[in-house]
Image: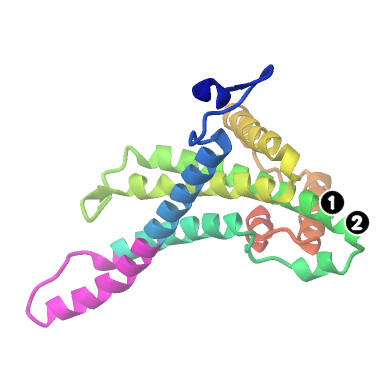
């Protein structure tokens, strides 16, 4: 009959006409999240620009919004981390990409994966370190505009994780992108469980190796923030 014609064809099951496929649902959800992320970033930018102007106007009439300067500083933190995540999503993080483009074409993709993997590892280390910072600040009574300071700091581990995941997602081939995402989560859990190693000045060979690795990664096009943060 007509209804079975849309669902079964021989031994193969066919999706009914009009039913959305999982891939289309994923694309719709992804577009929605992208618009939400862009909207939140735009709102933060507007707030950071409008608050000082509003404070200036209110002071002309003897009023005030309170500690506007501290609030704008913390909004700038949110803008920086969320803006970095958006730049990673668009593959527009600042880097020395011209160096990689000078290499033969067959090496460009490989060097991009290597440099972005190093950048992702630095981002995950920053993610764990910032999460510990926020956790340590939870006992503090410091507030900004009535909001505890650690609430603003929680965006740091979230932002650094997004940057790391998107670096691996962008650099990896389409077939292995989900593997890269799972690898990001695994590395994050390992760093959180094992902890970051304590820096030792006496380990000059380890320091030299780390700096050389960061230098090579920067030369091959790793994000500049990862090089500076790694140093």
Looking at the picture, tell me which residue is in the foreground, 115 or 74: 115
Residue 106 - label: 2
Which color scheme does this rendered protein use? rainbow
Figure check: 178 above or below 116: above
Query: What x and y, as percent, mark residue 223?
Result: 68, 60
Query: What x and y, as percent, mark residue 60?
Result: 11, 83
Looking at the picture, tell me which residue is in the foreground, 22 or 176: 22
Looking at the picture, tell me which residue is in the foreground, 51 or 16: 16
Label 1: which residue?
Answer: 110
Q: Residue at x 82, y 49 (%)?
A: 209
Query: What x and y, as percent, mark residue 183?
Result: 68, 34
Please rate how many residues cluster around mark 2, counting C-alpha atoms within 10 Å: few if below 14, some from 14 to 19, many from 20. few
Figure check: 50 above or below 185: below
Circle 1 SS class: helix
**Residue 94 seen in this snapshot:** yes
Are discs 2 and 1 less than 8 Å apart at CB?
yes
Q: Magenta segment: does it hold 43?
A: yes
Please rate how many residues cluster around mark 1, counting C-alpha atoms within 10 Å: few if below 14, some from 14 to 19, many from 20. some
Classify the position of the C terminus by image quarter: bottom right
Magenta range:
42-70
Residue 217 - label: none
Q: Find residue 184 and report its image quarter.
A: top right
**Residue 212 seen in this snapshot:** no
Q: Residue at x 20, y 74 (%)?
A: 54
> Comparing marks 2 and 1, which lies closer to the viewer?
2
Q: Residue furthest bottom?
A: 60
């Amino acid at each position: 009959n007509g209804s079975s014609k849309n669902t079964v064809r021989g031994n193969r099951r066919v999706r009914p006409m009009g039913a959305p496929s999982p891939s289309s649902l994923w694309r719709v959800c992804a577009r929605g999240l992208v618009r939400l992320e862009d909207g939140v970033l735009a709102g933060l930018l507007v707030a950071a620009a409008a608050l000082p102007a509003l404070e200036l106007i209110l002071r002309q009439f003897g009023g005030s919004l309170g500690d506007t300067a501290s609030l704008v500083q913390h909004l700038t933190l949110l803008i920086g981390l969320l803006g970095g995540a958006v730049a990673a999503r668009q593959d527009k993080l600042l880097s020395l990409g011209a160096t990689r483009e000078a290499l033969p074409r067959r090496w460009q993709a490989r060097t991009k994966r290597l440099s972005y993997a190093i950048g992702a590892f630095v981002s995950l280390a920053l993610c764990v370190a910032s999460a510990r910072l926020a956790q340590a600040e939870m006992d503090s009574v410091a507030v900004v505009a009535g909001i505890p300071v650690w609430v603003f700091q929680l965006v740091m581990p979230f932002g650094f994780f997004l940057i790391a995941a998107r670096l691996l997602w962008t650099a990896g081939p389409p077939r292995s992108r989900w593997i890269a995402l799972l690898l990001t989560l695994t590395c994050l859990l390992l760093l959180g469980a094992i902890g970051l190693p304590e820096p030792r000045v006496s380990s000059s060979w380890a320091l030299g190796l780390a700096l050389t690795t960061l230098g090579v990664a920067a030369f091959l096009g790793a994000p500049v923030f990862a090089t500076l943060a790694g140093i």
